[in-house]
Amino acid sequence: MRLVLKTGALCGNRPMKSDIEKTINGRVSAAFSDILPETSNKHTILKAAQDMLHAVWTGKIYSKLPKDKTTIAEFFFDAELEQFLNEAIEECYEKFRVLAERAQKNSR
């Protein structure tokens, strides 16, 4: 289990990549496809959703990480990282749903 985070201290000064993290873009595309507007900016909106989801997911991980020098790979199992991702998708979906509804109302 590996995870990319932009901190040297937690990752032993080397970036790591989790198998869970590699699924973020596809999961966002699948989960948000029903609320994304069909516009020329759809790709930009999808990228923003992916970035937001990654930030929320990373925040959930850091909030549960002990404050000592434990690395993420030493502390979390993939199943826990997956659960954090599921929670992040739920949170972000609701935020994007509201934004999509507002954008749709404003375009009328």
Image (cartoon, grey):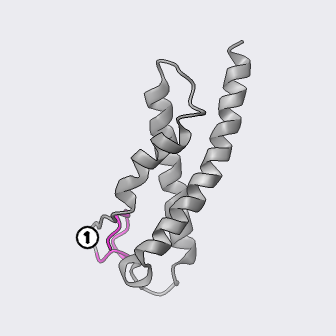
Front in this rendered view, residue 67 or 3: 3
User: Tag 1: Cα neighbours inside 10 Å, few (<14), some, or many (≥20)?
Assistant: few
Residue 6 within the segment the image draws in magenta: yes
Residue range (magenta): 1-12
Image coordinates of residue 48 in percent, x first then y, are 49, 39
Residue 58 within the segment the image draws in magenta: no
Q: Residue furthest top?
A: 108
Quick check: 23 left or right of 82? left
Place residue 6 in its image quadrant: bottom left
Image coordinates of residue 43 in percent, x first then y, are 43, 29
Count how many numbered circles sit on residues in the image: 1
Asked if 32 appears above or below 19 in the picture, the reply is: above
Q: Amino acid at mark 1?
A: Arg
Q: Residue furthest left?
A: 14
Front in this rendered view, residue 3 or 33: 33
Location of mark 1 (residue): 14
> What residue appears at the point 38 percent right and 59 percent down from the top-left corner?
21
Asked if 18 appears above or below 35 in the picture, the reply is: below
> What residue appears at the point 42 percent right and 52 percent down from the top-left corner?
24
Image coordinates of residue 87 in percent, x first then y, are 60, 61
Query: Which quadrant would the C terminus be assigned to in this image?
Result: top right
Quick check: 64 left or right of 102? left
Image coordinates of residue 45 in percent, x first then y, are 51, 32
SS for callout 1: loop
- Name the magenta segment's main secondary structure: loop
